[in-house]
């Protein structure tokens, strides 16, 4: 299936511009539409603090400050979007089939980011999420987890710096889980147009389910000739070994399942998903 619509949640961070560049690259590859979505904080969410012993006047002041800050951030994000599309000669219009080129539009809505992003992502072929900022706990990325857990669609985590190219050398992390299978399904359009595809697997990463040779046979039925490569953990970190293998392959896109264990267990113990999210320096497409 071709990619026709991308969703890009924007908050105005430095990583947001790299995500814009990544989304534009994907859009040009597939002649797709990018919807840049900014979710403004609803000042009414401050009201429940009244139960914390704050006076009505204090609540009003906090709501006013929240509204002002939200408006300023929305203006900054809109300005960044408009500057970026102007610099890159991107046509700004509503999503429409058959334009023959990449297009983009901007939307600002008010509410809870995790709810609205997940809802909008359900009617997007791919959601591009900015990389967590340096030092930021990846578990705090509401947009990322909303797409992974509540949209049923794949998410592409953009690197901190926009890639020079994307999708020419595709690496697939395989461990036999349902999440890996979902990632493979979403990656088939990318693998079909890639110059080379490599399946990365490790004994420490494999779970109960089909092995890498079986995946190789399955991909062949789709006309995809994939190499197989085994990697080793680094200092017992499977994620570190996986990223090293992807770099050695020269991958410009890594596809993998997310959170084979529960999210809570992953956040407490670490896990491959968390390591890749925090350390990857290439575009990573994840499914759950």
Image (tube, helix red, strand yellow):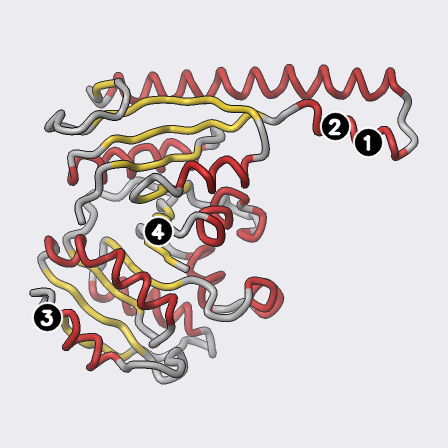
Q: Disc 2 to disc 4, how far (Cα)?
A: 32 Å
Residue at 63% across, 25% down: 42
Rendered position, 66 above or below 188: above
Element marked by disc 2: helix
Element marked by disc 3: helix
Residue at 34% across, 81% down: 209
Q: Disc 3 to disc 2, how far (Cα)?
A: 55 Å
Q: Disc 4 to disc 3, how far (Cα)?
A: 22 Å
Element marked by disc 4: loop
Q: Earlier in the sequence, mark 4 or mark 1?
A: 1
Q: How many marks?
A: 4
Rendered position, 120 above or below 140: above
The C terminus - image quarter: bottom left
User: On the image, numbered disc 2 is attached to which residue?
Assistant: 46
Q: Disc 1 to disc 3, how far (Cα)?
A: 58 Å
User: Dot 2: within a 10 Å radius of its alpha carbon, few (fewer than 14), some, or many (20 or more) residues?
Assistant: some
* Residue 44 lies in quadrant: top right
- Position of 204 with respect to 33 (left or right) is right
* Residue 198 lies in quadrant: bottom left
Q: Earlier in the sequence, mark 3 or mark 2?
A: 2
Q: Which mark is residue 154?
A: 4
Q: Earlier in the sequence, mark 4 or mark 3?
A: 4
User: On the image, numbered disc 3 is attached to which residue?
Assistant: 221
Where's residue 270, x and y in %?
A: 55, 67
Rendered position, 51 above or below 60: below
Residue at 56% across, 16% down: 72
Mark 3 or 2: in front is 3
Where's residue 40, x and y in %?
A: 56, 25
Q: Which mark is residue 49?
A: 1
Q: Are marks 4 and 1 in contact (CB under 8 Å)?
A: no
């Amino acid at each position: 299936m071709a990619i026709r619509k991308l969703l890009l949640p924007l908050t105005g961070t430095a990583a947001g511009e790299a995500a814009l560049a990544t989304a534009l690259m994907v859009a040009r590859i597939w002649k797709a539409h990018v919807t840049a979505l900014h979710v403004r904080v609803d000042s009414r969410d401050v009201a429940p603090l009244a139960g914390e012993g704050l006076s009505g006047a204090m609540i009003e002041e906090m709501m006013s400050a929240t509204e002002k800050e939200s408006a300023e951030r929305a203006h900054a994000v809109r300005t960044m979007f408009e500057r970026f599309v102007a610099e890159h000669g991107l046509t700004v219009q509503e999503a429409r089939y058959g334009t023959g080129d990449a297009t983009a539009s901007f939307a600002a809505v008010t509410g809870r980011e995790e709810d609205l992003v997940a809802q909008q992502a359900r009617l997007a072929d791919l959601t591009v999420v900015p990389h967590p900022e340096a030092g930021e706990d990846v578990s705090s990325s509401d947009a990322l987890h909303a797409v992974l857990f509540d949209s049923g669609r794949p998410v592409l985590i953009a690197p901190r710096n926009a890639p020079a190219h994307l999708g020419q050398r595709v690496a697939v992390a395989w461990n036999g889980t349902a999440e890996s299978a979902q990632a493979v399904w979403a990656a088939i359009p990318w693998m079909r147009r890639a110059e080379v595809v490599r399946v990365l697997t490790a004994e420490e990463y494999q779970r109960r389910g089909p092995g890498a040779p079986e995946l190789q046979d399955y991909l062949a039925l789709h006309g995809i000739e994939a190499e197989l490569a085994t990697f080793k953990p680094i200092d017992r970190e499977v994620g570190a070994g996986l990223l090293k293998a992807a770099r050695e392959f020269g991958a410009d896109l890594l596809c993998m399942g997310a959170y084979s264990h529960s999210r809570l267990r992953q956040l407490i113990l670490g896990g491959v998903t968390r390591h890749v999210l925090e350390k990857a320096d290439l575009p990573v497409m994840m499914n759950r």
